[in-house]
Amino acid sequence: MAISWPGFGPGIESVRSSQHLNPHSHTMKYQAYTLGNLQSLPQYERLSPEQIRAIEVVANVLPFRVSSYVTDELIDWDHLDDDPMFNLTFPQRGMLLDPDYLAMDHALQSGADRKGIQAVANGIRNKLNPHPAGQLEHNVPTIDGEPLHGVQHKYRETVLFFPSAGQNCHSYCTFCFRWPQFVGMKGMRFAMRESELLYRYIDSHPEITDLLFTGGDPMTMNCAVFRKYLEPLLSGPMHPHLQTIRIGTKSLAFWPHTFLTDDDADDFIRLFEEITSKGYNLSIMAHFSHPRELSTDAVRKAIARIRSTGAQIRTQSPLLRPINAKPEIWAEMWRTQVSLGCIPYYMFLARDTGAQHHFAVTLHESWEIWRKAYQGISGTCRTVRGPSMSCTPGKIQLLGVSEVAGQKVFVMRFLQGRNPDWVARPFFAKYNPDAIWISDLEPAFGDRFFFEEEDQSMFHEDYHQDDPESFE
């Protein structure tokens, strides 16, 4: 069924003629709940003492922030233990291994001061592989010998930009590999204030076709600030080799009012319209982890409004055991996304950082979930790719389990690679029923995977010590 936006027709022209009209009679005000104001949460009394204690302990190690939209419209407070949105946004005891949980619990109960608690927290954080895939060392480009901190260029065609004003999120996903951005540890934060060097770098690299704004969440910036980062693209001639502007965001799921009733919601719509009118392809890289995030009137109206600017919306999420590890969930999610005009893009695997032990699904199980979900959708949904691991050498897709030369193997291929020549080359790993990541696998034939020697030579390091997901 087509989704209509009150006051707007289906095309860009109707947006332009009505762009100053706010179709809502009142503005929804954003409210965030964190550990510091948890007791002011209206549903606080619905939490059990055990849940409250788990939140207090885990949130002293991993970041916690949830929006009133999530708490009021997405969480089922009558079934918290099994509720996917509660598990997605609230800290759970299982996110810390027992020794680490008990260490932090003891520090809090013993009355340790802030410095002591921080020391315990940082000790735990440093064991959680806070910057996987060599992001601090291997993906940061240079121009005139100067490192561009806040920029990453891992894959030939795509450069990632971390605007300093966008290093926040409306709510924190408890699985997210960006958690080091939010815990205040020195040297953990990616950010760049000035965009001048970014565009100089892009101009000097004609192979770059895609610029991805990421964070944090760029959509936590107000529109006036965001526009400043884009001004070099909008004010001058179109960059000849830059084709696509991507914006990675969870705002549609966690605060769709960014595009509806916030004070600058109309300004964002005009900005998107300017980008597409300039000739750039605008792709909103939206994160949806469960069909419930697509169920509200607000998110459906926000999707329709964004699409009316000429932007496309691509959708992605990791496969997460407590949240969406069932094929019927993924099939429903992909079908709903397509019905709303979105393009299913990626199913990722939980990366080896933070609470991977809590979220991970084995490679074999992930393939079974993928295969059954894929069988249950039409061709219009089959734009999605996965299950995929974003590792040091690139994005590796698990194609399936098979038998080759009498040996049970995982069949894999690169969807993206540090060396573009690796892309689409199938390779085989020995079958391991307990494997959850590439580092758990061994080559099925020979001593090394075909890419390992070259990958190691790039960085002079042990491949298996540094191989989880990138920031894309």
Image (cartoon, rainbow, N blue to C red):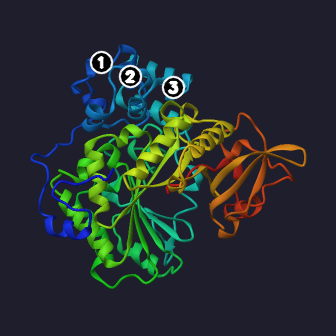
Name the image quarter holding residue 67.
top left
Q: Which badge, 2 or 1, comes first in the chain's sequence?
A: 1
Q: Is residue 281 left or right of residue 452?
A: left
Which residue type carries mark 2?
Answer: Leu
Which class describes the residues within 10 Å of circle 2: few (<14), some (14-19), or many (20+)? some
Q: Give the residue number, with chain letter if any, for mark 3.
A: 94
Give SS at disc 1: helix
The residue located at (49%, 37%) in the rendering is: 329
Q: Position of residue 399 (x, y in %)?
A: 69, 50
Tell me, yes or no, whether the two marked residues, 2 and 1, touch with CB atoms within 8 Å.
yes
The residue located at (67%, 47%) in the rendering is: 465
Q: Position of residue 17 (x, y in %)?
A: 15, 69
Q: Nearer the viewer, mark 3 or mark 2?
A: 2
Query: What numbered label is drawn on residue 46?
Result: 1
Q: Give the residue number, with chain letter if any, for mark 2.
A: 80
Residue 194 in view: yes
Which residue type carries mark 3?
Answer: Gly
